[in-house]
Image (cartoon, rainbow, N blue to C red):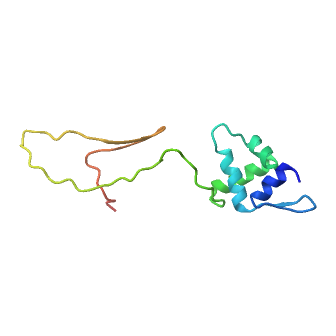
């Protein structure tokens, strides 16, 4: 048995004598997830899994449509942290003192979210 077949069998792929393979959704999702790793290419991952690049691209399309659930990414650092929102107690201020304009900024890569001081903690709808 070749190394590729051993690898595929360990993923749960059924390999028939005719050469036909039956891929479980978990194995397809694993292959698609591997294409999303930094520096990975569809051609490289397809060669590792022994499939044609167009087959792997078809699985990627399934994942984009939500028909193939990808495994959770294993990260060294957390991506999200809990955000606790609470009411701020009203502070009596002197009429001549202006409240500072504070803005909450959430930045992740190229995505930037800014919340002004008047942003409600709950959905007004």
Quadrant of the image containing the C terminus:
bottom left
Q: Is residue 42 left or right of residue 80?
A: right
Q: Is residue 45 left or right of residue 19?
A: left
Where residue 10 appears, x then y in whole percent? 76, 57
Pick the residue in front: 61 or 125. 61
Q: Which residue is drawn at 93% across and 61% down?
A: 18
Q: Residue at x 64, y 57 (%)?
A: 65
Q: Which residue is drawn at 47% across and 47% down?
A: 78
Vertical relation: 40 (above or below) 74 = above
Vertical relation: 44 (above or below) 32 = above
Quarter location, residue 70: bottom right
Where residue 47 appears, x then y in whole percent? 80, 44
Q: Which residue is drawn at 72% across and 54% down?
A: 59
How many numbered discs, if any?
A: 0
Q: Is residue 111 left or right of residue 40?
A: left
| Residue farthest along the right direction in this orientation | 18
Q: In this view, does 1 lie to the left or right of 91?
A: right
Pick the residue in front: 123 or 74. 74
């Amino acid at each position: 048995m070749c190394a590729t077949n051993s690898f595929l069998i360990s993923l749960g792929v059924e390999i028939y004598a005719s050469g036909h393979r039956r891929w479980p959704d978990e194995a397809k999702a694993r292959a698609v997830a591997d294409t999303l790793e930094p520096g990975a290419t569809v051609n490289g991952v397809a060669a590792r899994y022994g499939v044609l690049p167009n087959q792997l691209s078809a699985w990627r399309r399934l994942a984009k449509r939500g028909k193939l659930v990808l495994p959770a990414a294993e990260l060294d650092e957390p991506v999200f942290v809990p955000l606790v929102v609470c009411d701020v107690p009203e502070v009596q201020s002197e009429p001549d003192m202006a409240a500072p304009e504070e803005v909450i900024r959430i930045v992740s890569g190229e995505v930037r979210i800014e919340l002004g001081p008047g942003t409600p903690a709950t959905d007004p709808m």
